[in-house]
């Protein structure tokens, strides 16, 4: 290793650096343990960390330093996750409450069992997805369902995260992160070394300050005279100006829409400011049930919502209350066991799902067969992280005609993922209030593992019949923003909404 104090070779020309750059390069050259992390360089050079980072980047641009970068995913339990590990997951505690009540649990009894509204909602959805909990009320296990002492997959992974184990089920880990029980922090560690040129470079002495810029004011005042200036590095890269181009994420969404049009779908749109009726009620989302918390929405103040047509409002109310529709003798089903509140139906809300667009389309009683989709923005109260954002795009779509089944929906999912170059797709049963049966499709992200992006199912009769639709309808609400993360190679959803010119110039993450 070169000694920074040695004399330069005969005939060489000393290259001057700024004082921080010189101190950083001297520290790198003097170290016997390379490469060094940035905080180690800062300690050796006795400089602030931010100043060292800037100096290292400048040394790199001058070919005097090299860097090795390592990306780490650090997993840890959130406070909610620590509580779940100590007290039990909501679904485990719900089953325990069910056992204490003799296997039957009413909605009111469930509210007194120490579970919050959010925990009850999560527990009900999870247990129904696993085919453990029967539909309807009171809550009860399905017939011939027996429980053993085996841990749920989520309980196993929670313990593994607490024990800092490396080999985990990525799909379960992703589900726990979405539930706010696990936190995954993506860190980048940079380790620096002097390049071969940086080792050999003769360093000029710093007896007097060296100036790095010449301004118009210096020329006018004559202050430039007598100063010593750092020489220019003619090999240094110069800025390259590019013309305007379309945002990579927006361009990808247009391409995805073209794929759907090519499959015979017609694009539709709906308003961003909706009412509870179109956003939830018409989709058979109960007004006073924990399932409503699936979509934690924004409610604007000082805005009045417009009521839906009176006849449609009456039909939806009948479905919610378990009454026969006007002109019919038999109810569609038992409903939600309470009275329907028309004032809630008119409450304005920022749209939390583009399924509202499909509901408005179906309310127009289209003539089957029909295929339609919408790619538009939605808004939810979310903790912003690598997979979640307050604002996101969703691709809603429906297929309505005689003979449509869940197999057709799976076929659409496979066609779409293959068309955008994603070869791996997993399908598993799921639960949504407005579809039955329901499924979820997962695709593999190169860094985040399996992520859920393709939820869908067949609309329930309680959704279709009040709208006057007589044919089966397959529906989906694709998390197209997450799908774009996989297709564009983004590891953080925020990268898709960034204003990083360098990233946008390259055409995406």
Image (tube, grey):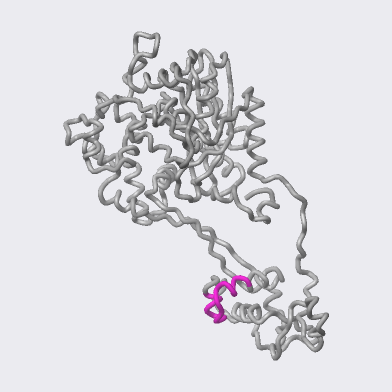
As displayed, is residue 284 above or below residue 99? above
Judged from this view, the residue extending furthest toward the bottom is 207
Query: In terms of secondary structure, what is the magenta stretch mainly?
Result: helix
**Residue placed most toward the observer, 278 or 170:** 278
Q: Which residues are magenta?
A: 40-54
Q: Is residue 414 above or below residue 303?
A: above
In the rendered image, which quarter contains the N terminus? Answer: bottom right
* Residue 354 within the segment the image draws in magenta: no
Residue 77 vs 8, above or below: the answer is above
Tell me the residue at 52%/79% (across/down): 43
* Residue 16 left/right relative to 473: right
Query: Residue at 68% across / 80% down in the picture?
Result: 18
Q: How many marks?
A: 0
Where's residue 373, x and y in %?
Answer: 58, 27
Is residue 273 rendered to the left or right of residue 106?
A: right
Measured as percent of width and height from the top left, residue 458 is found at 46, 22
Q: Nearer the viewer, residue 402 or 168?
A: 402
The answer to whether any part of residue 152 appears in the image is no
Q: Position of residue 39 (x, y in %)?
A: 52, 73
Residue 79: which quarter of the image?
bottom left
In this picture, residue 16 sits left or right of residue 317: right
Give residue 60's position: percent from left, percent from top.
67, 69
Q: Is residue 346 visible?
A: yes
Residue at the image point whose x is 70% and y is 68% from the top: 61
Give the side of residue 206 with respect to residue 323, left or right. Answer: right
Q: Nearer the viewer, residue 50 or 213?
A: 213
Point 75% across, 49% down: residue:
244
Q: Is residue 53 covered in magenta?
A: yes
Residue 502's place in the image compared with 422, above or below, is below
């Amino acid at each position: 290793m070169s000694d920074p104090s040695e004399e330069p070779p005969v005939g060489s020309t000393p290259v001057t650096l700024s004082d921080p750059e010189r101190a950083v390069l001297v520290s790198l050259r003097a170290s016997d343990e390379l490469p060094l992390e940035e905080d180690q360089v800062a300690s050796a050079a006795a400089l602030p960390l931010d100043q060292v980072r800037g100096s290292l980047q400048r040394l790199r641009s001058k070919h005097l330093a090299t860097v090795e970068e390592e990306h780490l995913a650090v997993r840890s339990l959130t406070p909610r996750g620590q509580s779940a590990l100590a007290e039990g997951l909501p679904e485990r505690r719900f089953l325990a409450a069910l056992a204490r009540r003799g296997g039957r649990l009413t909605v009111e009894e469930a509210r007194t069992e120490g579970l919050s509204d959010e925990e009850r909602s999560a527990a009900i959805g999870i247990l129904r997805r696993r085919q453990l909990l029967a539909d309807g009320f009171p809550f009860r296990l399905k017939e011939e369902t027996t429980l053993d002492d085996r841990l749920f997959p989520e309980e196993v992974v929670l313990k593994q995260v607490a024990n800092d184990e490396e080999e985990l089920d990525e799909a379960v880990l992703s589900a726990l992160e979405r539930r706010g029980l696990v936190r995954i922090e993506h860190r980048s560690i940079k380790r620096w070394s002097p390049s071969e040129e940086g080792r050999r470079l003769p360093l000029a002495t710093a007896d007097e300050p060296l100036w790095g810029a010449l301004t118009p004011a210096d020329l006018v005042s004559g202050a430039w005279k007598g100063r010593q200036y750092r020489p220019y590095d003619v090999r240094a890269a110069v800025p390259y100006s590019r013309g305007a181009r379309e945002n990579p994420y927006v361009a990808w969404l247009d391409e995805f829409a073209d794929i759907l049009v090519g499959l015979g779908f017609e694009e539709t749109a709906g308003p961003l400011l909706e009412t509870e009726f179109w956003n939830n009620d018409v989709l058979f989302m109960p007004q006073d049930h924990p399932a409503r918390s699936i979509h934690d929405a924004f409610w604007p103040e000082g805005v009045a919502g417009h009521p839906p047509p009176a006849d449609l409002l009456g039909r939806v109310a009948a479905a919610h209350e378990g009454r026969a529709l006007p002109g019919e003798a038999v109810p569609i089903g038992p409903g939600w066991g309470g009275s329907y509140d028309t004032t809630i139906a008119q409450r304005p809300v920022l749209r939390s799902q583009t399924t509202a667009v499909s509901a408005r389309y179906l309310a127009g009683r289209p003539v089957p067969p029909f295929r339609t989709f919408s790619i538009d923005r939605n808004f939810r109260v979310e903790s912003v992280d690598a997979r979640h954002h307050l604002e996101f795009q969703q691709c809603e779509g429906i297929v309505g005609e005689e003979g449509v089944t869940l197999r057709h929906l799976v076929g659409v999912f496979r066609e779409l993922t293959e068309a955008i170059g994603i070869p791996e797709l997993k399908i598993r049963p799921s639960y949504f209030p407005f579809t039955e049966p329901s499924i979820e499709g997962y695709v593999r992200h190169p860094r985040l593992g399996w992520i859920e992006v393709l939820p869908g199912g067949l609309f329930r009769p309680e959704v279709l019949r009040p709208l006057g639709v007589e044919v089966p309808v397959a529906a989906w609400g694709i998390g197209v923003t997450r799908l774009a993360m996989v297709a564009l190679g983004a590891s953080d959803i925020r990268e898709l909404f960034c204003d990083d010119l360098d990233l946008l110039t390259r055409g995406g993450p």
